[in-house]
Every structure is written in C-alpha cells, then in structure tokens.
Amino acid sequence: MLRTCVLSLALSGSLILPVAAEQLTSAQDYAAKAASQAAANATAGDRSSPAQVSPAPSADVSPQLQALIKAPYPPHFNADPKTADEWKTLINQRAQLIMTALPAVKEKLGVTVEPSTIGGVKVYIVTPKSIPPINQNRLLVHVHGGGYVFAPGESGTLEAVLMAGFGGFKVISVDYRMPPDAPYPAAMDDAMAVWKEAVKMAKPQNMAIFGTSTGGAMTLAMVLRARDEKLPLPAAIAPGTPWSDIDRIGDTYKINEWVDNILVTWDGWLGRAAKLYANGHDLKDPTISPIYGDFAGFPPTILTSGTRDLFLSNTVRTHRKLRRAGVIADLNVYEGMSHAQYQDVNTPESREVFTDIAQFFDRCLGK
C-alpha cells in the first residue's frame, strides 16, 4: 500500500516546504562524493574509499566504552626503538602504567596475585576471594598479551585478574621470557614448560587456556605444540583477538588502520615488535602465526573482538578455520571496540566478555 508514501505528493500542489541551505549542501556533497567513488570503483580491483571521520557509536555501547573509543592514540603507537636498551626503556614505561592501575582492579574484584615458579618458569597464581564449588577442581592457564614485548612481571596479569574476578577461577599466569633478550621461541618454550607441569596439578578435562592478542596467538600455538608433543589438550580455549597472523595479512589490517585507537597500525611499534620477536624466522611458522597450523581436533573455542579492532580479520579468519575443521567455536564481536578494549574493569562490556568466557568454560570443562 502506497498511501503513506505518496502523501507528500498529494499535498505538493498546495504546500511547498522550504529546504534548508545546509540540506542542499549536504545533498550536493553526497552527490559529488558518490560520483567520485563510482568513478574510482568502476572496474574490478582494489577498492577505494574517501577519507572520513568515524564518530564513536552510541547504540548498544556503554558510556564508559564510548569514552575509551574516543580516547586519543597511545603515545607509543609509532615508537621505533633502535637498541635493546631503548626497547627496555619503552617496555618499563608501559609496565609502570599498568602497575599503577592494577592494585585498584585487584581490590575491586577481590583477587590476590602471588609470584611462584612452575616448570622453572616464573608465574603468578591469581586467586579470587571466593571460588564457587563448581570451579574448585578447575584450573586456567593464562598467557598475556603485549606484542611479545610488553607486560613483563606482574603487569602481565591484568587479564588473569579480570578472569579470576568475574569468572571465579584460579588462574596460573605465565610470565614468559620476551625480547629483546629472549626472542622466539623462548615465550612458547616457557608457556609449554608451564603447561607440562600444570596438567599434573589438575585434570586436563578441567583445564582451559586463555589470553588476548599475543596471548591469543600463544593459546592457539600451545594447542598445536601440545598435540605435536603428545601432551594432554585443554578442554577449552579462549583466544581473545588473537595475533594469529603476525604479518600484515588480513582485511582489517588496512580497513581498521588509523581507526583502532589502541594498535593504530601494523607499521608502528607493532610490526617492529613482530620482527624483533620472530628474529629472522618465517612469519608463517604456525607457532608464530598459528593461522597456518592445522586446527583439526582443537578443543571448543571462544573468540572475542570488536568492529574497530585491527585484529578483527585475524579473529574472523581463526574462527572460520576452526569451524571448517569441525571445531565448536563461538565468536563475539563488540560494537565500536578497538583492540582488546574489553580489558577495562570500569566498563560493563568487560564484565560481559569475561562472564561469557566463564560460561563457555563452564559448559566445556569437567567438574
């Protein structure tokens, strides 16, 4: 029925509505942009898009997350350390920022963090004030993010604190060795040394591995290595926005470049850290870029990303490869969120993310 659609036409003989000048200008601007883009994309090939401003979304996004979305780029996004000492100075500066905020997060969530050693590797035992009965026999292993260079020591436990606090799990957070002193494969060797001992502390069917970004990639790579080394596999994994392809391969490395206000661009510190970590090894080595590994037989997996995340393609590619391998895999993508922005205890989205992961683990882990 066209009655409502043609009402203005029926009235047009007796009523002429004024059109604001700014509306005409906007329409003219759009017409010019549309014509220009049509010409630029008239043939098959690379797609061209005009430069534009991306306002922070407000629909289905909390005010707290909106504030993070509007935040300026981090000052280190284009850092270019030339020496080991310069890398260490940057690493320590970033760690200090985290350590300044971490005590308040631990207090808010009622979580304790204690240093320890497992398998000859430094770890932190992260324990919530109260562990629900259903989680008493469960144990999680956490591998932190930070581009293989950031978050040494206790500064790498933030995500473990959030998981312990929101999920009610005991967590082992691995303080693996990192560049510039210890490039690949030191981080993976440390993580596997911990896993070999951790499976003696709890039943593997009651265990999960999780981590974000670098930690997400390491989570995937740990499963690949555990399978190859005939070790028990975890009952579930949660690789958050995983750096599953360490090279600049994937649609959102370009589409979300300069929009993600956390990583910003692979061509800044991120790509430099990738090369520092790989230390001359092939970037497509599955234990560096696990997207190139065989995901057959992987445990159930939950992945998390955001629409502005530079690693959204990494996350999507990982999800599709898992599903093609017949693996149970959930994918949660948050509106407006840049890379790993769910690790802020003051946003309701943070609680939502870690509650979702905890519920996924509850479905997959034994009692």
Image: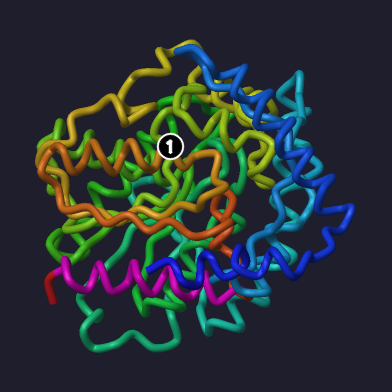
Tell me where the magenta segment starts and ends, as one range.
347-365
Residue 348 falls within the magenta-colored stretch: yes
Residue 16 point in image, percent of width and height: 78, 64
Residue 267 falls within the magenta-colored stretch: no
Q: Which residue is mark 1?
A: 313
What secondary structure prevails in the magenta region? Answer: helix
* Horizontal relation, residue 170 to residue 175: left or right: left
Q: Residue 268's quadrant in the figure?
A: top right
Question: What amino acid does circle 1 point to?
Answer: Ser
Residue 190 point in image, percent of width and height: 38, 40
Residue 326 lies, with reference to residue 154, above or below; the image says: above
* Horizontal relation, residue 84 to residue 255: left or right: right
* Horizontal relation, residue 76 to residue 7: left or right: right
Of the pair 36 and 227, the residue shown nearer to us = 36
Residue 6 seen in the current view: yes
Q: Residue furthest right?
A: 21
- Mark 1: secondary structure: helix
